[in-house]
Structure formats: C-alpha cells, structure tokens
Image: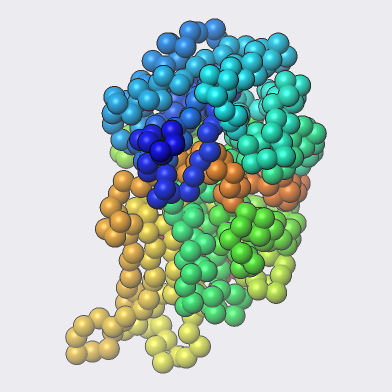
Amino acid sequence: MSKESRHPFLQGLSKHRGVQPTIITIFGASGDLCARKLVPAIYNLAVDNLLPADFYLIGYGRKPIPDEEFREVASDAISKFSRRSLNKEIWERIEKNTFYCSGGYDEAEAFQKLSDKIASIEKDAGREMQSVCYISTPPSVFEPIIKNLGEAGLATKYQSSDKHTKVVIEKPFGKDLESARNLNRVIQGVFQERQVYRIDHYLGKETVQDLLVQRFANSIFEPLWNRNYVDNVQITVGESLGVGTRGGYYEQSGATRDMIQNHTMQLLALTAMEAPASLDAESIRDEKVKLLKAIKPLRLGYSDSDVVRAQYGEGLIAGEKVPGYRQEEGVSPKSETETYAALRLTINNWRWQGVPFYLRSGKRMARRVTEIAIQFKRPPSSLFSENEMFNLANNALVFQIQPDEGSTILLNGKIPGLQTRTQPVKMHFRYSTTFGSNTPEAYERLVLDAMIGDGTLFIRGDETEASWNLITPLHDFWKSEGQRGIETYAAGSWGPNASDRMLWQNNHEWRRP
Ligand code: BG6
C-alpha cells in the first residue's frame, strides 16, 4: 500500500477531485481576512477530507512571531470563525505542518528565505510540491510581492508541469482602468495567466454557482431569457451594515469600487451571458467578457443620467438610531464618497436589445439582501386587465443569492371563491428546506479550486479591464463634479428618491425585496 492511500486525508479523496501535495503561503497572515475566512476555510476542507496528506501552511507577515504563536492565532481563528467547531485531532494534523515567515513585502532576502523554507519542507517530505501564494494584503504591496515572488524563483518553479506555482489575489484589482491594466502588466510580467487566480468571493457562493445550473441545466428558462419576454432585470446587493471601522478604506473606494465593479457586475455577467461552449474556465470567462464588452457606455449628466450616487444619512436600523456616513469614524465630514450607487445599463446585443438592466448596491439599506430579479412582460391578452377584481403583477423569477437562499417565481393566481378574483402568488425553492443549511462558505470552494488549478470561479485579467472600462468614466465624471449630485438617503431605507426616479423614466420601479 502506498504512503498516500493509508493517510486519513487521502482516504476521502477518492470521492472528490484531488488536490496534489501543496504548500500554501498566505501573505498578510496577521490580517482580518486570514483569520475570518482563509484559516477557517482550510480547516473545513480538512474536515471534509479534501486536503492532501502533504499539506503545509505558511503565514507570511511583517511582524516577527514564532511558529507557535501563528499556530495559536490560527486555532483561535478557527474556534471563533469556523462554521464547524474545532476538532482537536483534525487541527493537530494541520498544526504540525503550519509555519510562519516574517519579512517586509519589498524585502528580496525575506522572499529568498521563504523560498528556502519551501525547499526545506519539500526536502523533508521527500517530494516536490506545488506552491499556492495567497496575497491577502492591502493593494499597495501587490506589486512588490509579485515581483519578489518572481525574483525568488517561485513564479517559474515547476512551470511546465501541473505543480506550477499558483498566485491568488484578493481584490481590489486596481482602482480604475489604468491601474487595473498596470496591475495586469505587473502580474503577467512574472506569471502566466493560467497561474493567476483573482478572487471575487461572490463567485464562490453556492447560489451564484447555482445560477449557471439554473440557467443551463433547465430547459424552461432559456426560451424566455431574452428581449421578447423579459421586461427588465434588477440586481440588488444591499447591506444593512454601515462602514463600521473601515471608514479609511471606504473613503477611497465607495460603493462602485467596493461592490459594483466586481461583485455586482459578476452577477450581471452570469445572468446575461450566452451559454458557454463548455463548462471549462476559459469558455465561461470568454462569455462573461463578451457580455461585459457589449454594455453601452453610461450616459452621464443630470437629466436622463444612467447613474445615481448617494450617501446614507442618520436613520434607524433594527429600531436603533445609527449615524450618517459623514459622521462615521475615519470619514471626512465633507466626504464625496458614495455609499450607494444605482446604474441603468443597456446591453447592446441581439438577446438583450432594449431590456434595461438595473443594478444597485448600498450600505445601510433596509435589509441585507442580494437578489437577481428577472421581470417578465405582461401577457398580451386583456382578459384579466387591471381592475379591482384583478390584482396583477408582472411575472418574475427571483434568485435570492443571500440570505434565505433560494429562488421564487411570481405568478398571478385565482383567489379561491365563487368570484374570479386574482392576486400575485409565489412558488418558492429554499436551499435550507431542500438541502439543510450547513453549506460550505465561498472561501472553502475558492481555496480548494485554486489548489486544484480550476480557474472557473476566478476573474481573468481581461474581465477586470472590461468592467473598469465601464466604471472609470463614471468616476472621472463624479470627480469633476465634486459634491454636486450626491443624494442622501436615510439609513434603513431602500436608497434615495433619485434612484426611484431613474426607473420611473422607463415606467419601472424597484422591487422591495
Ligand atoms: C466585500 C466588500 O468585498 O464584500 C465589503 O469590501 C462588503 O464592503 C462585502 O461588506 C460583502 O460581502 P458578503 O459576502 O457579506 O455579501
């Protein structure tokens, strides 16, 4: 019997896609993301028997701490943030293979030390292993890290085999088109595109992956999925939280950079793209890029504009009074940063000609909810025309991405009774009722896929550029306008009136999810 087949981790692998022996290095190991998401994701993969026998974790950070201290930080993170409680036996298997390397991100010698550490792990294990370099740092150090990985020889290690180094990068990928292009140039100067895994954690969410299944594994939707039947599409990514302690970061970012350019545009691309030729990463990403490129430039200005921006003022969240954005810690009292943005998009292709796509995202909205609503046209017949007997709604198919994951079809039905009276009724599918509620977190899937080398749920360089190409003129316009045109909405509301007015111009209105 081989060494692998006896190992408890690998026994589970026969049932799953295999991860080869891996050394994962997390840059930014003392950061929030590492503790809240990455270490718990690794732990949960171990619980599910999805890690290989030879699995090693290296934390890399500026602060010099011994291995033992990083191990403690990691086990505390699991106890606090993992969806499953810490099982000592499983943790001990990861713990003994967990190390820490300290150094600056621009210090070439520190990267050489890291490379030596990786080589010594391989030597002790008696085998070559793939390296996964997970960059979870502020964007200001992306460039030195990437360059130093190249200098230390890690980017080209085992390059011609499937053991080649993979680099995983957290957002933001630039702050505009130019910086995104620069970042892509830096990355592509060191790594080949197939080695690069740009994270958008929304793609790791179960319900987002299910979008492709709902669209392409069912035959009933496709015939309706076009301008002949769809009246408009509304994508809402609302949060009830404010900026909390992240005011400093958010001031530089705002809702369009933080949520619209990435997460919301990804939801749009998956909803509106054509069927890919296959389920492989390149086919799916080709279709997303095609769709993003088909979006018409936004109309900017003050009458008939395709965009609305706003900031939350004071208001009530769950009955509690909360401060306005400009009163938050780290936020300028004269801030011009939007905490809400709504966009009206036109997709210039055969399928979607004339169908408005409305996107909105905001902090401190009435509820935390992400949904995609396909709103269908009214039936042609006037048999049930609107009067007091017939309360009719447009048919809609709504994907509830989170929370309360599932989908709903909105229909018109007869109210039981001797008269013919109608009202809108709903057909629900709920994940929790059908599948139970303990589904994997987005980061579990994404860390696993990066280790496997499957780029389907990651963003390709040209996708980020296509999305920035749409959003950057908007930022340039807002910058030139200063405070002008920033609306206010009460915390706990559904956004500013100007956003409702934008839809009324097309005889539409926002759903109240
Ligand atoms: C992040 C944003 O990318 O996504 C945050 O930076 C936001 O501002 C978060 O709160 C929302 O993610 P989720 O998974 O909680 O919807």
Q: Residue at x 44, y 68 (%)?
A: 397
Whether residue 340 is visible to the viewer of this picture, yes or no, is no
351 or 82, which is in the foreground? 82
Residue 387 rendering spot, x and y as whole percentages: 37, 83
436 or 57, which is in the foreground? 57
In the rendered view of the protein, which quadrant contains the C terminus? bottom left
Q: Is residue 100 left or right of residue 172?
A: left
177 or 331, which is in the foreground? 177
Determine the image quadrant of residue 345. bottom right
Residue 72 rendering spot, x and y as whole percentages: 38, 15
Residue 153 rendering spot, x and y as whole percentages: 73, 24
Determine the image quadrant of residue 502. bottom right
Q: Is residue 267 left or right of residue 417?
A: right
Q: Residue at x 45, y 90 (%)?
A: 382
As drawn, which residue projects farthest toward the front? 1
327 or 25, which is in the foreground? 25
Q: Residue at x 32, y 40 (%)?
A: 318
Q: How many marks?
A: 0
Q: Residue at x 54, y 75 (%)?
A: 222
Q: Is residue 450 above or below residue 99?
A: below
- In the rendered view, how is the structure colored? rainbow
Q: Is residue 52 left or right of residue 163?
A: left
Residue 56 rendering spot, x and y as whole percentages: 50, 25
In the rendered view of the protein, which quadrant contains the N terminus? top left
Q: Is residue 17 left or right of residue 427?
A: right
Whether residue 208 is visible to the viewer of this picture, yes or no, is yes
Q: Is residue 365 above or below residue 354?
A: above
Determine the image quadrant of residue 172. top right
